[in-house]
Every structure is written in structure tokens, then in C-alpha cells.
Amino acid sequence: MNLFARCLLAALVSVLLISPAFAHKPPAQPVVIVAGIYENFTVGKTSGDLEGMRVVIVPAGGGYYAIVQVAQGGAEDPKPELVPAEVKGKTVTFAVGDEKYSGTASPNGLTLKTASGETQMLKRKACSSYFK
């Protein structure tokens, strides 16, 4: 084998052995699925009233909808309202009556912000918890 063929063969083998080392990919970011159940309901210690919010985001009809319950005191679950929701990546926006909400979903929950700037964290719940 002549010198040129040996050099070419050595270069080819080197490229094949080294290229996988440079092909290291950074770890993938976890995929966040926005659809789910989020809530922060609490029962008042002295009054026994239900306070907080529940948002259920469901994909349907080529878009998303939010089932929203806002508890501001009372003994029973508040009436749910079904509203259209806009989902882009990890963000969601929807309006209930005159109140507009925007939020960011994570594996742990949904951070919601009102138009007036108030922020609250709704914890992600198991889907089976919705009908309990």
C-alpha cells in the first residue's frame, strides 16, 4: 500500500472515531404539557369557608378550554365556568368575566397573573382528583 492510501485510511479512521465524541448533545429540556388540573383551594381555619382557585385546561375542538372555579368564601365548590383558553408553548391566557389571567405551566403547577398584577401559584393535581 502506498503512502497516500495509508494516510487517507488513517484520516478516515480518525474521523469516524472522533466524530461521535463531538456529537454530544446537551440534555433535553423537560416537555411541559399545559393541559391538566391546577388548584390552590384551602379551607379557612376559623370560618371553614373555601378559598382559592381551580383551573382545568383541556384540549378540545382544535384549541384549548379552561374550566375555572374561583372560591371567595362559602361552604361549597363554586360554580365552574368554561372559557376558551389560548396556549402557546408553556403559556396560557384566558378570561373569566372581566378578569383576565395569564400564566406559565411547569411540571409542578401553574403560575397565574391577573391583569392587576396579582400572582398566585396553583399546584398541579392528578387528573383522577378532578372527580373526587
Image (tube, grey):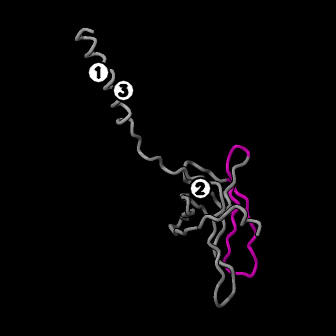
Counting from the top left corner in percent of width and height, residue 20 is at 38, 33
Q: Nearer the viewer, residue 114 or 51?
A: 51
> Which mark is nearer the camera, 1 or 2?
1
Which badge, 1 or 3, is on the more N-terminal residue? Answer: 1
Find the magenta span and give its range: 61-84
Tell me which numbered mark, 3 or 2, is placed earlier along the sequence.
Answer: 3
Q: Position of residue 5 (x, y in %)?
A: 28, 11
Between marks 3 and 2, how big is the CA–CA gap? 49 Å
**What's under tag 2, amino acid-wise?**
Thr
How dense is the environment of label 1, judged by Cα within 10 Å: few (below 14), some, or many (20 and up)? few
Residue furthest toward the left?
3
Q: What residue did someone put label 1 on?
A: 11
Q: Secondary structure at mark 3?
A: helix
Where is residue 12? Give x, y as percent. Answer: 33, 20
Q: Is residue 19 left or right of residue 64?
A: left
In terms of secondary structure, where does tag 2 sit? strand
User: Taking 17 as reference, is 53 above or below it?
Assistant: below
**Mark 3 sits on what residue?**
16
Asked whether the residues under the numbered discs 1 and 2 touch, taking CB atoms below 8 Å apart as contact, a structural biologist would say: no
* Disc 2 target residue: 93
User: Which residue is at 55% across, 59% downward?
Assistant: 107
Q: From what the image shows, is residue 8 above or below residue 128?
A: above
The answer to which image quadrant residue 125 occupies is bottom right
Q: Farthest residue in the front direction?
A: 1
